Image (spheres, helix red, strand yellow):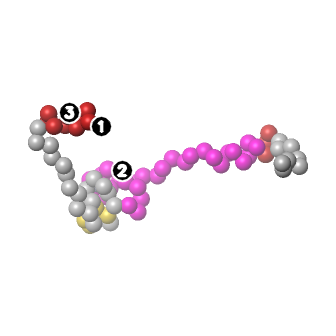
Amino acid sequence: MALPTQKRTKSSKRIRTSTFALKKQKLINCSQCKKAVMPHHACLNCGYYNNREVLKIKTIKHKNTKNKKTLKHKK
Ligand SMILES: [Zn+2]
């Protein structure tokens, strides 16, 4: 079994793991609806990208509130 030739110091270990931290995702506001959107992505709320509509967003309408409750229980 292969063994490390030299001891890894606390410092070298910490320098290596300092790059593991997750960076906060940068978001921009949609030009149409002002919601937070990932840059270079179409807005999933209104379907706009670069001030023009590129996606047609369909909204699901529930006929009554009883159906919503039954759907939740099935999941
Ligand atoms: Zn939008």
Which residue position holds label 1? Answer: 75
Instruction: Give SS at disc 2.
Output: strand
Tag nearer the camera, 2 or 1: 1
Region in magenta:
13-41
- Relative horizontal placement of residue 7, taking residue 37 as reference (left or right): right
Q: Earlier in the sequence, mark 2 or mark 1?
A: 2
- Relative horizontal placement of residue 9, taking residue 32 as reference (left or right): right
Quote the CA–CA distance across marks 3 and 1.
Answer: 10 Å
Please state the horizontal and vertical placement of residue 75, each as a whole percent of the image.
30, 37
Instruction: Give SS at disc 1.
Output: loop
Identity of the amino acid at label 2? Ala
Residue at the location (27% across, 53% down)? 45
Extreme-right residue of the structure: 5
Identity of the amino acid at label 3? Lys
Please state the horizontal and vertical placement of residue 18, each as a whole percent of the image.
68, 45
Residue at the location (69% across, 45% down)? 17
Q: Do the residues under discs 3 and 2 have CB atoms within 8 angstroms?
A: no
The response on whether ligand 1 sits within 8 Å of label 3 is: no
Please state the horizontal and vertical placement of residue 49, each as a whole percent of the image.
32, 64
The response on whether ligand 1 sits within 8 Å of label 1 is: no
Instruction: Give SS at disc 3.
Output: helix
Which secondary structure dominates the residues rendered in magenta?
A: loop
Which residue position holds label 2? Answer: 36
Quote the CA–CA distance across marks 3 and 2.
Answer: 29 Å
Extreme-left residue of the structure: 63
Which residue position holds label 3? Answer: 69
Disc 3 packing (10 Å; few <14; some 14–19; many ≥20): few
Q: Does the magenta run of residues contain 20? A: yes
Up-down relation of residue 61 to residue 68 (above or below): below
- Relative horizontal placement of residue 25, taking residue 29 as reference (left or right): right
